[in-house]
């Protein structure tokens, strides 16, 4: 009987390398596929695609598996980065890593893998899949600290067909240990953080190449001008650092923080001390993607996460007409940012997510 072929998305990091190693041990015919999603224009950029591909080659040499490289930079720019810029121009806070999974890793990447003869595709994501009669369900990983279902909330049940997540039942420390014991050269490589095309660069400097800086006023909610901002796009709700504001004579004490953004008039609203106005217990989401489909009940108790690695919060969700989902949290949530994703859970099952309005 022919061995089943698995094409593994290799990033040059330890997680995807161990995923490939485990699959080969299980008897699959494993092929590595490296994606280049961003093309650097300068020599001082922090996106290390060439270095990562070098690490992929080293990993594949040790594992004795073939590998390929594919350039999806145009698809990434059109499907992910354009949306990223449009959202910032609206004063929202997008999460391109979520879109990258739906629009790149489980779309053109999967299609390319099929052309290579893949029976399955696999990645180093920390999550699990459970196939049921009514579709494929996305489940949280054994390692709650590394769980990546939040970033996969927009994939469909169909996109999860014939997908393998070998790390779903492992703890990160176990993955490192497996890599060291197997002699995988990236066993101690530092995990990548942040958005791939920004990397370790200064975010404000990077964004200014695409959205020109325009200074404007920082105002309190009662209209008092207390400072100057460097571009309203570059701030997020609840942000404390980088405001450059000190105490005001006769004013209240405490740290300053961003409370609102008026993009049209280029005004950044800030407040000091009392953060109660940053909290809300009601969240509305649009373009909600249920995996595999909405629950039969139009209202149901669940858990919600509004940012990666946030502890799950108790909530009640209501499915409204037009693809809107209303979420009422048991405890008020701080700095709920429009443009980010709210992701729902029922036990270990990730129900999907939507864009916060």
Image (cartoon, grey):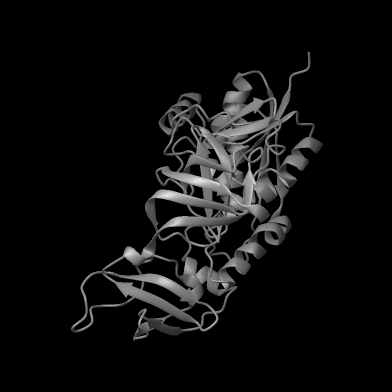
Give the quadrant of the C terminus.
bottom right
Residue 282 seen in render? yes
Residue 10 image offset from top left, x and y in percent: 62, 39
In the image, is residue 253 above or below residue 50? Answer: below
Q: Residue furthest top?
A: 1
Depth check: 90 or 185 in front? Answer: 90
In the image, is residue 97 above or below residue 262? Answer: above
Residue 62 seen in render? no
Q: Residue at x 65, y 63 (%)?
A: 83
Q: Residue at x 27, y 67 (%)?
A: 274
Residue 37 image offset from top left, x and y in percent: 65, 53
Residue 259 image offset from top left, x and y in percent: 39, 70
> Taking 164 as reference, is 263 left or right?
left
Q: Residue furthest left?
A: 250
Give the quadrant of the N terminus.
top right
> Taking 240 as reference, is 48 left or right?
right
Q: Residue at x 56, y 79 (%)?
A: 212
Residue 299 image offset from top left, x and y in percent: 55, 43
In the image, is residue 248 above or below residue 40? Answer: below
What is the count of numbered marks?
Answer: 0
Q: Residue at x 72, y 37 (%)?
A: 158
Depth check: 344 or 94 in front? Answer: 344
């Amino acid at each position: 009987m022919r061995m089943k072929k698995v094409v593994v998305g290799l990033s040059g990091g330890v997680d995807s390398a161990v995923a490939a190693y485990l699959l080969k041990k299980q008897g699959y015919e494993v092929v590595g596929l490296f994606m280049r999603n961003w093309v650097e224009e300068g020599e001082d950029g922090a996106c290390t695609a060439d270095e990562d591909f070098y690490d992929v080659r080293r990993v594949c040499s040790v594992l004795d598996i073939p590998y390929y490289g594919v350039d999806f930079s145009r698809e990434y720019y059109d499907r992910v980065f354009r949306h990223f810029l449009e959202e910032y121009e609206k004063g929202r806070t997008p999460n391109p890593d979520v879109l990258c999974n739906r629009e790149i890793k489980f779309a053109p990447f999967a299609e390319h893998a099929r052309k290579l003869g893949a029976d399955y595709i696999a990645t180093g994501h920390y999550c699990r899949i459970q196939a049921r009669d009514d579709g494929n369900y996305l489940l949280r990983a054994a390692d709650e600290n590394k769980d990546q279902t939040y970033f996969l909330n927009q994939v469909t049940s169909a996109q999860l067909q014939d997908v393998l997540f070998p790390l779903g039942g492992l703890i990160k420390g176990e993955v490192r240990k497996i890599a060291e014991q197997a002699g995988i050269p990236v066993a101690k490589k530092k995990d990548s953080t942040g958005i791939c095309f920004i990397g370790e660069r200064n975010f404000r400097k990077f964004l200014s190449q695409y959205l020109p800086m325009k200074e404007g006023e920082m105002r309190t909610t009662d209209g008092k001008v207390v400072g100057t901002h460097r571009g309203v796009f570059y701030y997020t709700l609840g942000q404390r650092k980088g405001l450059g504001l000190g105490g005001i004579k006769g004013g209240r004490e405490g740290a300053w923080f961003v409370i609102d953004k008026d993009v049209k008039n280029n005004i950044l609203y800030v407040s000091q001390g009392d953060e109660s106005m940053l909290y809300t217990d009601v969240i509305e989401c649009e373009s909600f993607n249920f995996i595999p489909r909405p629950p039969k009940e139009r209202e149901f108790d669940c858990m919600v996460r509004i940012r990666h690695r946030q502890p799950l919060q108790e909530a009640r969700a209501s499915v409204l007409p037009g693809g809107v989902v209303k979420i009422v949290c048991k405890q008020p949530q701080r700095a709920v940012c429009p443009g980010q994703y709210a992701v729902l859970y029922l036990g270990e099952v990730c129900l999907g997510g939507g864009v916060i309005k």
